[in-house]
Amino acid sequence: MYEIMSSDEAIRLIRDSDVICVNSFVGIENPVELHEAIYRRYQKMQSPRHLTIVSSAGFGVWDENRGAEGYIRDGAVDRLICGHFGAMPSTKKLVLEDYFEAYNLPLGCISHAIRAQASGLPGALSKVGLDIYVDPRKEGPGINRLSTDDQYVKYVEVDGEEFLYYKLPKLTVALIKGTAADRKGNVSFDDMFMSGDALSICQAVKANRGKVIVQVDRLVNTPSRPRNAIIPGCLVDAIVVAEPEKRNEAYTALTGSFEIPYEEWNKWNEKIDSVSVSHMRNDTAGNIIGRRAAAVLRVDDIVNIGIGLPEMVSRHARKNGMLDNITLTVESGGIGGFPVSGEAFGAMIGAASVYDMANQFDLYNNGGLDVCFMGALEVDGEGNVNVHRTDGAYAGIGGFANITAKTPTVVFCMTFNAKGLEVSQKKGVVTIEKEGSVPKFVKNVRSLSFSAKRAIKNGQKVLYVTERCVFRLTPKGLKLIEVYPGIDVKKDILEQLPFEVEL
């Protein structure tokens, strides 16, 4: 039977060496009050300590002085297992400084491993991750020198087929953010952007005789409609009521509390963009890339568009009228709306459906998308891509590996180089005014996020769309298939590459 507690009371249920699973998505729907209660207790008692924290998509709030950042920085955590670290500014720095063990698994594979544990299975099989960094035959999932535990990802063969086997430690504490709890302890997510892995996390923790702690905005007397109660009260140990953070009107629109017709998507996206710390690019190179990449779209396509430069695709899909003829998706579980970026990445404007995150990755893993548009940090001559690691910086793979693993058409949107690149376009003629100092096409990628060899084996169509040309992946490597008007093939393309390409 659940109990209503203060956050400080609820956190006493956590013991040293517990394995905490946090339900959140990058920077949204994080149970911040529960994290801060852990920090208060740790500062006072030096407990709980030796914690392991698992999160499919990360659990930061883009602020190194809020949420879990404090107790992680002060030493309460021994191990992190996450799909993405981007919203945790101080934590991702400490990872690279070897403060604690840290493992980066594909977001969808963590989600499925949680669901497997909820059903009594020790782990989950997947073809996602084969031949990229997480494959133990390559680098393995460990990010730093301390992270040498080989139990989380294993290469296995079943019935003559190769898989990776993803296994998590037994989850013993669930930290969940919900909207409301009724008098029976049933928890709804009505005013939230997504429910993520909430149900699977609670089921796994209870199967392991652990504790489920849920932070909600309010208590309600009337029981929720059964379909809206994501977590049944019988799975809950403690409910903490915390004053909800005030949301700008733009962000309130993302909860699905009121209908947003297609005709109003652009208006609401502009409102959200105006209050976000991250604004849409409006540079010439980005527009060239977005316009060309959007030409790949076909009516009735099911699509995923990555954050950053690929977001220009949605802008041009709206301009050319294609946006109303395709179905967009986002990793957190939204489908049929318009994904937003910045602080609220993971939410959707006008979503038709928002279901459990594990179900979304069922779709991605099995090739349910028609096309995806992804960014790239580095590409080599074979067509391999690095998207998750640079020199001295690390965000994590997120859902990238799942999305690109089996999607029939994969489009990488990238500039030829970075840091100083200046491009102009007049009457369709492209001019490279100044080259950037950091090349994107390299002899060898720093780490493998996307395997060209695996893509060829899968029969995927892979394009690399830049501000000056388009490459296509072939069994021999990159082939130059399109050069934009005004571009000098030798000077602007071939002399800028550290490898030869097929012409």
Image (cartoon, grey):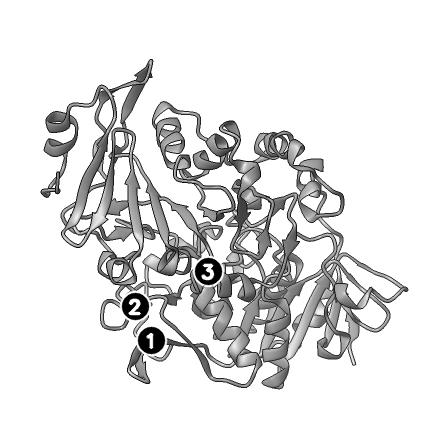
Q: CA distance from mark 1 to mark 2?
A: 7 Å
The residue positioned farthest toward the right in the image shown = 221
Callout 2: 10 Å neighbours few (<14), some, many (20+)? many
Position of 252 relative to 315 (above/below): below
Q: How many marks?
A: 3
Q: Residue at x 46, y 54 (%)?
A: 369
Callout 1: 10 Å neighbours few (<14), some, many (20+)? some
CB under 8 Å between discs 1 and 2: yes
> What mark, if any, has residue 130 been given in the picture?
2
Q: CA distance from mark 1 to mark 3?
A: 16 Å
Q: Position of residue 423 (x, y in %)?
A: 29, 22
Q: Residue at x 33, y 57 (%)?
A: 96
Task: Give the camera-side residue of 238 and 312.
Answer: 312
Q: Position of residue 210 (x, y in %)?
A: 62, 82
Q: Can residue 210 be spotted in the picture?
A: yes
Q: Secondary structure at mark 1?
A: strand
CB under 8 Å between discs 1 and 3: no
Front: mark 3 or 2 = 3
Please name the amino acid that badge 3 sits on.
Tyr
Q: Is residue 109 left or right of residue 405?
A: right
- Pointer 1 residue: 163
Task: Give the camera-side residue of 61 and 78.
Answer: 61
Please name the amino acid that badge 1 sits on.
Phe
Mark 1 and mark 2 lie on one chain; the one further toward the N terminus is 2
> What mark, if any, has residue 230 been given in the picture?
none
Please name the amino acid that badge 2 sits on.
Leu
Q: Position of residue 414 (x, y in %)?
A: 31, 38
Mark 3 and mark 2 lie on one chain; the one further toward the N terminus is 2
Callout 3: 10 Å neighbours few (<14), some, many (20+)? many
Quadrant of the image for the N terminus?
Answer: bottom right
- Pointer 3 residue: 364
